[in-house]
Image (spheres, helix red, strand yellow):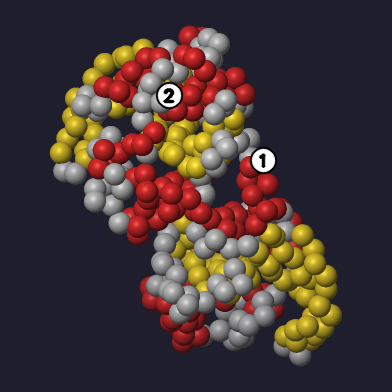
Amino acid sequence: MPPIEPITLRTDRLVLRPPSNDDAHAIAKLCGDFEIARTTSSIPHPYTLDHAREFIEFCRSEREAGSAANFAITLTDTGEVLGMIGLIVDAESERAELGYWIGRPFWNQGHATDAARAIVDYGFQTLALQRIHAGYFASNEASGVVQRKLGFQPEGVQRRHIVRFGEPHDLDMYALLREQWEARRDADPFRPTLRTERMLLRPLSFRDADACHEIWRHQTVADGVLSIPHPLTPEQTRERLQRILTDAPRRTGCVWAIILRGADQLIGDCGLEPDDRHLRGELGYCLHPDHWNKGYATEALAEIIRWSFEDRDPALQRLSADHYPENPASGRVLEKLGFQREGVQRGFLLKDGVRRDAVRWAKLREESSEPASAGDFGRC
């Protein structure tokens, strides 16, 4: 199996990263608690520093073999290790087993649910799994609560399946299928699926990596987008997509794939990064050059603007967007949508080592009117 690339995942409170040798003392201290070993299937007790070092090396070798992806769960603010979480992967069958533990000082604070949600999203988005399953001792109901919160469904009980410290345990089995995860994701009020006359706007997923690369690799696209380098490798595309899929939900934002109806073809993406404290948001988009000058960007953004001002909760009061002065076509799109030019921010952006100006446009909610009709989309 190909290696599983080491990446870092983030939530509001946690950073999930591959464990390093520097984590050995923290892992040994937390796993030295018999309450941790008692509710897991393989952690030995007593647990020594050598056990921790062997485990960290095991995580590295399993990742390189493509058979597991394990993460140290750390606090965003302090970097302190509070537990471990991971997936044992069967790539051929497109499935994985979820496992995790949280140190006792960090129980009952929602960390297990937070970390497990990030790992489940990673498994379906990045690893393209079709199924994730998990088991827990019937006596460890707290673990069952975590799994049910994430939408896992019961699949039965394996009676006296594991013997730990001389005591047999029933194993409650739960699983989440890809279509169930997608349904829960699509029901997210911050990441809805939107529709226009010609297009479907659905949340971008890791399965879109090849289609995104076909769009982002063009120099004319990269020239207008701050975060796209040129030339662009498939690996850089996957890294950028992973950042989008990790960061946007954490900020209650979304990046939508622009899909042509009928052709079921992904032709671009558009995104909203909100700031709910100030009830404002920033828009961005890019299209494959073959689909420029056909009104697709205007049509897609018009629907996102409508949703942001009318359907989103909380409704935003201001939307803004920037473009380079060398890209006046984006300004024409925004002008068609009722945005007003607010000025030029000099040296505002740094791309490829060069400071670039940014033309800032904005639209207020009270300036919003009826969406443009299909005939109003022109050629932008």
Number of numbered discs overlaid on the protein picture? 2
Mark seen at residue 253:
none
Task: Bin the neighbour count of mark 1 within 10 Å (Cα to Cα): few under 14, some 14-19, many 20 and up.
Answer: few
Q: Which residue is mark 1?
A: 187
Task: Look at the picture and state if 317 lies above or below 255.
Answer: above
Say if residue 151 shows up in the picture: yes
Q: Nearer the viewer, residue 210 or 253?
A: 210
| Position of residue 23 measured from the top left corner of the image (x, y, whole percent) | 43, 72
Label 1: which secondary element: loop
Of the two numbered discs 1 and 2 on the same chain, state the one appearing first in sequence.
1
| Position of residue 359 measured from the top left corner of the image (x, y, whole percent) | 27, 22
Q: Is residue 215 left or right of residue 80?
A: left
Looking at the rendered structure, the kind of residue marked 1 is Ala
| Position of residue 42 measured from the top left corner of the image (x, y, whole percent) | 63, 83
Q: Which residue is mark 2?
A: 295
Q: Nearer the viewer, residue 324 or 24?
A: 324
Label 2: which secondary element: loop
Front of the two marks 1 and 2? 2
Q: Is residue 18 left or right of residue 182?
A: left
